[in-house]
Amino acid sequence: MTRLVLALVPALATSASAADTGFRDTAAPFLTAHCVKCHGPDKPAGGVRLDDLPADPAKDVERWAAVRDQVRDGLMPPAKEPKPDAAQARAVVAWVSGATGAKAARLPNSGNLIPHELLFGKPAAAGDAPAPRVWRLSPDAYVGFASQVFRGKLNGLVQPFTLIPERGIKDFAGLYAIDEPSTEILVRNAEAMVEAQTTAKNDGVREFVTLVNTAEPTRVQLEAAVQLQFKMAIGRAATADEAARFARLYEKCAGTGDRPGAVKTMLQAVLLKTDAVYRSELGGKADGTGRRMLAPAELVTAVSLALGDKRDAGLAAAAAKGELATREQVAAHVGRLLDSPREADRVRVFRFFREYFEYDNATDVFKDKPKTFIHEPRQLVADTDRLVRHVLAADRDVFRELLTTPVSFVNYTTKENKQTRKQDPARAVVPNPNNNKGQAGVESVYGLEEWPAVQPAALPANTRLGVLMQPSWLAAWSTNFDNDPVRRGRWVRERLLGGTVPDLPIGVAAQVPDDPHRTFRDRLTVTRDAACWKCHQRMDDLGLPFEQFDHYGRFRTAEPVLDPEATAKNVDKKGKPLGPVHRDAKLDTTGTVADSGDPKLDGPVTDPRDLVRRIAASDRARQVFVRHAFRYFLGRNETLADAKALQDADRAYTESGGSFKAVVMALLTSDSFLYRSGM
């Protein structure tokens, strides 16, 4: 068999590296039996060759990762070919993951690669449990960790972690590791936190303050301090071996004569444990099927950080009592946190919508200050934040409401009424009464002449609906000086229709002609070139209806373009040009939904309102929305094994009348969230 493999895949046998053994015994036989027949040197299917893969996956991570994901997700071999043995397929997936350092093959926003019909086309049974994983804390979760270790002000604390500058969802398991610069910051932060903990003033930890001032701490005192630090930093009790090991660290350091410093070193070491800065999801005791439900301590962290930024005390208490061992017990705590009056307990629910819509990027798009009205992107984002919270508070038909609601908060804030001591609505951004140069207020961007005292306010009829026509979203998906129908269309294709669009190839200059006398739609016809249209046909006609608005997000019925003839004649008596003259060009807001996967969706649309109403009523679009929620709350892209979890979440949404809480509950009590494989 080995000789046959090497004959069929010669390039794979040339390496003498340590990867050879795993390749020879695991991957090569699989490739020969199931892959190279179609993906060999002669007319490889899809233009993908697998016969020349290097034996060391680290030398061609992209192709090996694609093999891993296709096998893992059951997409390859195709249905017409013999199905591989499940154990053999798992072994290949595990070997590739290990050989590539378990690097994620795809970023969060490279999802939608599993055909939608395979996930929702027919009722799904429970699939294989996902692999165990270790997940680095997010920047927000690290701040939450620090606040639980020490509740006072930590001067000098530096954020050690960052997230990738990606579109949409950013906090994915498997994307991040702690490098040397992060480690240096973690060490300095641990020193700062322990210094604060052991200071008698203000918010020091009494037991630690006593310990550093004790001339000869006993082993009992040392281990008690370790246990307290474990509880605050890791959320569990230290084992007897762990407590003894940290006490011995103190004794070793105390040999220099600096006993207070030795106490601090011991406490700092706990803060630097892997458990403190990583989330372990390995699973506890295996059940009869080989699956492992997350251990109670793991569930405390997993549920807490799925919904908020710090470990929840109620979950920790339940775990300590042995009351976090069943799906029903987990569900009770998820429901408690979702219904909590404190948004901090469930703040990540709101953040999902920021990462999904990305309207908060409006603050990153620089625009010239307009002369006739006030453009204040921070306020536009705040208005949309409030609208999202308003829809979530009602928790009814959330997806449709977010896309089609005819109301909005407009230039809104609250100020305390000194008489009633209550927060009254107020105009957030007020033009300077002495030097506003005739600028209209922020409310004019919404199409209103006056600030509405009653909010959310009904917007002018037949102008805008929902988040995709909020000025914040329109500005976020624009350029410095113009609209961006291509990126808007890509957003609709990926986030609402569940399609994929490749990134712009390296070396390709995407430039719309700078012809100010033509409408943007007319100038965008450059993408109809054969080399471009393959991808642009999936975006342009979905984004062009939003030409109904200018790049500041204002509704319009015509597009101003340069009038060359009038400009040429616009001169003074000496023939000196007086500046450009514009004319209003007819505005075309039509578009097309094509290749959506849902025949009811496909067809021409007249304007952006027609587009979003049609999509909001689509079962497919709702299911795609659930897929994105899955990625956010579970920190990974979905696989075929997650079909049941996705279907259950979608069913929970429809049966509850469109409750997003029901979606979150279903996801956080699914097998995909609760279980790990025994690999």
Image (spheres, grey):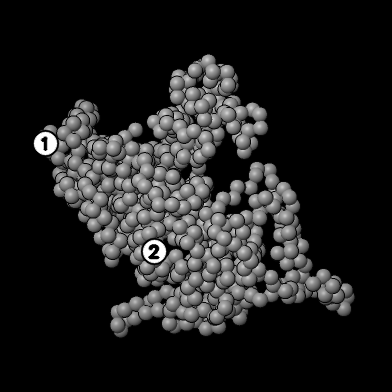
Q: Which mark is residue 220?
A: 1
| Residue 233, x across and y down, in percent | 26, 45
For the residue pair 671 and 369, the one nearer the viewer reads as: 671
Classify residue 556 as left or right of residue 205: right
| Residue 17, x across and y down, in percent | 49, 19
Label 2 and label 1: CA atoms lie apart by 56 Å
Q: Amino acid at mark 2?
A: Thr
Residue under numbered circle 2: 654
Name the quarter where the C terminus is drawn: top left
Q: Which mark is residue 384?
A: none
Please tell me how crowded label 2 is: few (under 14), some (14-19), or many (20+) other residues with Cα within 10 Å: some
| Residue 223, x across and y down, in percent | 15, 37
Can residue 478 be seen here? no
Q: Quadrant of residue 271?
A: top left
Residue 664, placed above or below residue 608: above
Classify residue 662 as left or right of residue 212: right
* Residue drawn 48% across the image and 20% down it: 24
Please tell me how crowded label 1 is: few (under 14), some (14-19), or many (20+) other residues with Cα within 10 Å: few
Classify residue 226 as left or right of residue 662: left
Classify residue 112 as left or right of residue 328: right
Label 2: which secondary element:
helix
* Residue drawn 53% across the image and 15% down it: 3
